[in-house]
Image (cartoon, helix red, strand yellow):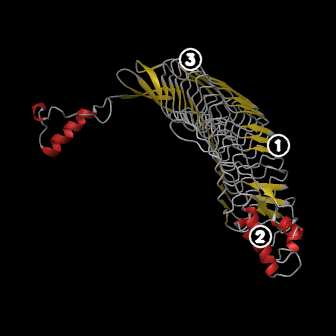
Amino acid sequence: MKINKFIAAAMALAIVGGSVPFISDIAPDTVITASAADYEEVTEGDFTFRVYSDHAELTKYTSTSVKDVTIPETAGGQPVTFIGEAFYGNKYATAVVIPDSVKEIGNYAFSGCSNLTEVTIGNGVEKIGNNAFAGCGNMVDLTFGNSIASIDNSAFSNCSSLTEVTLPQSVTVLGSSAFIGCSSLVSFEMSDGIKILNNNTFGGCTSLRSVKLSNNLVTLANEVFYNCSSLKSIDIPDGVTEIGTYAFFNCSNLGKAVIGKGVTSIGTSAFSGCSKLSDLKIGENVISIENNAFNSCSSLTEVTIPEKVEIIGSKAFGGCSALTTFIMSDAVTTLNNNVFGGCVSLTKVTLSNKLKTISNEAFYNCSKLESITIPDTVSVIGSYVFFGTALKSLDIPKSVKTIDASVLSSCRSLTELKVYNPNMVFKSNLGMDKTVTIFGYADSTAQEYAEEHGNPFVVLTGKPVTTTITTQKNNTPSTTTTTKTTAATTSANAQKEKLFGDINGDNIIDGRDATILLTYYAKTSTGYNGTLEQFAAGQ
């Protein structure tokens, strides 16, 4: 029976209100919208359609015996252009042919068809809706038409028997989680019309070994290849500007990654857990490497950071247990928390010449790191920075203003610490052994620290020499500061055995010691360069 919703609504108004307003009584800008378009419900065999004036939509399929299903091209004299949830949860159909007349496969149309093995999509289909074939766990043969433009969110999620997919070149949109959980998918070839790979497109495709990305790709969104544990290599096109968070997380067989020159940001945990990644090429325009980006990439041995990189996030290379050499760009100003924590093979690090802050645990437990040069631009050293390293000696430049707790804890090989800022603030115990000799200026905070913690102390003679060289760059003068010092020749152990104030070493503190001390400082004001111990020995 044909239903006219608009006429029915008008009649209802007449009954309730007593009259229907004339058109002349309605304001000219009023829009009247019918609650639904006119359609006629038609059943043909096992199919039920809504037939409109210019097309028909398949809404229901009822057969429990037919396995090979061919959807009609027409119904009620109109072309079938849309498939609704007609097959949702169907347990009987094994093969479906969708005719060329269909333009859209709606949301959940074939979702949960657990025995569906073969699907042929006609050349007229332009859109495959959300979850359209989700959970078709036995689908092995999928044929696309040549007009598809959009494959929406989760369209083929958990189609766990699919092994190969080649998209037609017409596809421009691939929705979030479109092929998530396709655990048997081995290869995937993408159309060049796709510019964005949305979140979790291939998440959990644990058999995926090779994927051909679109040459026009711009964005790799979050978790795109999350846990694709069989993926061997990835070549990210130069057009891509961003790699999202967890994009390749736990791709445990990924051995090679080429990051194109267009990429500016590598997201949080993007390659974390890629334990076989040994061949890494980072594009020249990367600016930011975010937290955990390459954490636990335990096969990486050498990394050179491109010159434009400004940010290396916390734990970015933490747990890279095979990493031996790391060369940093000079654009980096902050080394964030635990950047190299657990890099137990690290022996060579070149730090940025513009580095200002070395944050907490930056080199935590880098147990083979024997030496490092801290640039004279660094002003802050956080806590536990060199915990458990193999450092033998460490020079802290004059630029460092504060140093935090336990920086040198468990540094069993450390014998010398030189502090060139006489006013550097020791926020807490550095945690180093009491046998470590501290070198610093007389009456400096380094000397106070040594005396407080029982470490041998050796005086650095001379004073920091500042040379100012003014250059004109953007009308801003530039100042270069250099520091020249020499260590006292008196051994730390000998100095430790002396009584404090016993200048001449006779184990008696008296007026003679005071006379020698005053005479020494008078001599130094006239150019004498020897140490106090050397002067006292000649008296």
Which of the 4 quarters of the picture holds residue 401? Answer: bottom right
- Is residue 408 visible in the rendered image? The answer is no
Query: Viewer-proximal residue, 222 or 504?
Result: 504
Crowding near the residue tagged with mark 2, few <14, some 14–19, many ≥20 C-alpha atoms within 10 Å: few
Which residue is tagged 1?
324
Frontmost of labels 1 and 2 is 2
Side of 89 where 483 appears, left or right: right
Q: Which mark is residue 146?
A: 3
Q: In the rendering, at what x and y percent does residue 23 appear?
A: 13, 31
Q: Position of residue 28 (x, y in %)?
A: 15, 31
Q: Residue flagged by tag 1: what amino acid is it?
A: Thr
Q: Residues within 10 Å of mark 1 (few under 14, many from 20)?
A: some
Q: Are marks 3 and 1 in contact (CB under 8 Å)?
A: no
- Judge from the rendering whether residue 67 lies leftward or rightward of residue 229; answer left or right: left
Crowding around mark 3 (Cα neighbors within 10 Å: few <14, some 14 to 19, many 20+) is some
Q: Is residue 203 left or right of residue 56?
A: right
Determine which quarter of the picture holds residue 301. Answer: top right
Residue occupied by mark 2 = 519
* Mark 3, secondary structure of its residue: loop
Residue at screen point 56% across, 17% down: 146
Amino acid type assigned to the residue bearing label 2 in the image: Thr
